[in-house]
Image: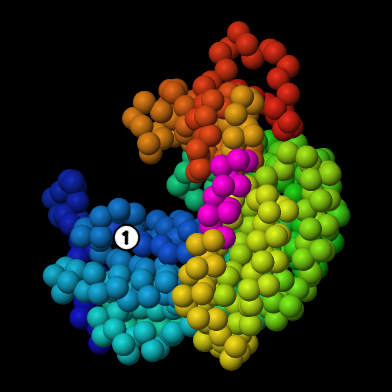
Amino acid sequence: MGVNQGYRSFLSYVTLPSQSFGESGIITHKTVVMEKRVYIETYGCQMNEHDTERILRLLAGSHYLETKDAQEADLILINTCSVREKPEHKVYSALGRYKWLKEKRGAIIGVAGCVAQQEGDRLLDRVPYLDMVIGTHAIPMLPQLLQKIEFFGQRICETGFDPEGNYLKTILPQKPLDKVKSYVTIMQGCDHFCSYCIVPYVRGREKSRSSREIIEEVRHLAEMGVKEIFLLGQNVNSYGKGLEEEINFPKLLRRINEIEGLQRIRFTTSHPKDLSEELIQAFSKLPKLCEHIHLPFQSGSDKILKAMHRGYTKDSYLEKIDRLKEVCPFIAVTSDVIVGFPGEEEKDFEETLDLIRKVRFDDLFSFKYSPRKGTRAAQFTDKVEEKVKQDRLSILQEIQGGITLQKNQEIEGRVEEVLVEGWSKQSEKDITGRTRTNKIVNFEGDLELVGKLVPVQITKAYPHSLRGEIVPTHCRLQDVDCGVKSSEILT
Ligand code: SAM
Ligand code: SF4
C-alpha cells in the first residue's frame, strides 16, 4: 500500500451543509468537489510536450488544475523521454527532488512517457515512494488509475500496448493552453526501426488517427482562436497507413488547409525516405502550409546510413533537398544529425560535414550517439571514443553555427510575415513571434497584436533570433517581395 492511502479521497469530496435549511428546517447536504493541483515536468520532444498537454486536458475533467509550483501540487508527474541518455538520467534526479513532497504533503508521484514504458515495474522497485508508472499508451486511463491510488492506495504500473489505438482518441481542450498555436497528433509510433532508436520500442508501432477526428480537433482549436497548428508524428509521411479510408499525408494537409480561421500549418517529423513528390508539391500549392521542413539526415556517410538502417543515401537526400528548393525557393530546412555512431571514421564524419555545407541548413539539432538498450546498434562493437564524439560534435556545431548566422543575415532587410505569440523573453518592451520559416523575431509592439499576422522588416540577425520593426500601416500597400507566399497579413 502507498503512503497516501484513502485520506486524499476524503479531503477531495467533502460533504457540506447546503446554503439553506429549506422550508422543513431539515439540513440538507450537498457534495462539493474540491479542486486539486497537478504539476507536470516534461522532458523530450514536441511529442512529449503535447502528451503533457493531453494529460492536462484529461485531468481537468477530474478536477485537477495545473500548477507551475510543485510545492502546492497534489499530483506530481514526470513526463519522460528515453531517446537519449541525458533526459533519461534527469528522471531519477527529478524524482529525488520531489521525495520530500510525498513525505510532507502526501502528494501522488508518477512517471509517464518513454522511460515509464521502458522501465515499468523496475521503476516502482527502485523508487519506493513512486505511486504510478504510466506507459505511452495508458494516458487515457489516467483518471481511473488515479482513483485506484486515491481510494485504495495501490501502486500502479500500466505499460501495456493498446493495438486498438485508444491512446490516440481525441481529448478536446475546454480552452487552449496557448491561444496562438497548438499541437495536434496525427499518428504515433514508428515502424522504421532505425538501428539506434528506441522509439518503436517505447511508443509502439505506427498508428494513424482517423482524418475525421483530426479535422474535428483542428476545427475546434481554430474556432477557439488558435491560428497555427503543428501536426505531430514520428514519421508524418506514412500517415494513413492502416486506415480504412483513402487518405495520405498530402491529402490530409489539403483538407486542413481549408479550415476557416486557421492561418498556418506546420508538421514534424518527415523521414527523407518517404518524402514524396506530392508532399513536396504541397509547399507550393497550400497557402497555409509554412515554408519550413524538418528533415533529419542523421549522417552524410552512406556506410553509416546503411548501418543506421535509414533507407536512403547521401545523394538521394541531397536530391530531395534540391527538389524542395526548386518547388519552394525560400523554404527553411532544419535537421537532426548524430555523431559518433559505431564505426564512424574520420572520412565518414567528413561526409557529414560535406552534406552540412552543401545543404546549408537553417538550423541543426546535433547529438552524440548514445546506445539505447534493446536497439540493434547497442550490440555494435566498433564504438567511437567519447572524446572523439565530443570533438566531432564541437567541430560540427561551430560550422553549423556560422551557417545559421549567415542564413539569418540573408533575411536582413526583408519583410516577413510574423505571427505574434506574446512578450519577448529578452526585453520587457518587445513582443515576439515567428516567421513562416519558423525563425523567432523580436520587435517593439503591443500585446494587442498577439494572434495577429504582422509584416515585420528584419533589421538585425543573431545566431538564434532576428530583430525587426513592424512595417508602418501607410507602407503596407507596397508590394514587398519577401519571397514567401503572402497570406492574410494583419488579419
Ligand atoms: N522520427 C524522427 C526521424 O526519424 O527523423 C526522429 C525522432 S527521434 C525522437 C529525434 C532525434 O533524436 C533523431 O532524429 C536522432 O537524431 C536523435 N536520436 C535518436 N536516437 C538517438 C540515439 N540513440 N543517440 C543519439 N541521438 C539519437
Ligand atoms: Fe526513430 Fe527512425 Fe522511427 Fe525516427 S524513423 S522515430 S529515428 S526509428
- Where does label 1 land, which residue? 39
Front residue (pair 250, 379): 379
Q: Is residue 397 magenta?
A: yes
Q: Is residue 359 magenta?
A: no
Give the residue furthest to the top: 474
Q: Position of residue 199 (x, y in %)?
A: 58, 75
* Magenta residues, start to end: 396-407
Q: Main secondary structure of the magenta part?
A: helix
Is residue 321 found left or right of 84 in the rendered image?
right
Front residue (pair 185, 417): 417
Q: Position of residue 383 (x, y in %)?
A: 56, 85
Front residue (pair 199, 354): 354
Task: Give amino acid for label 1.
Answer: Tyr
In the picture, the quarter occupied by the N terminus is bottom left
Above or below for 423 versus 357:
above
Is residue 414 found left or right of 463 in the rendered image?
right
Looking at the rendering, which quadrant does residue 411 occupy? top right
Is residue 203 found left or right of 205 in the rendered image?
left
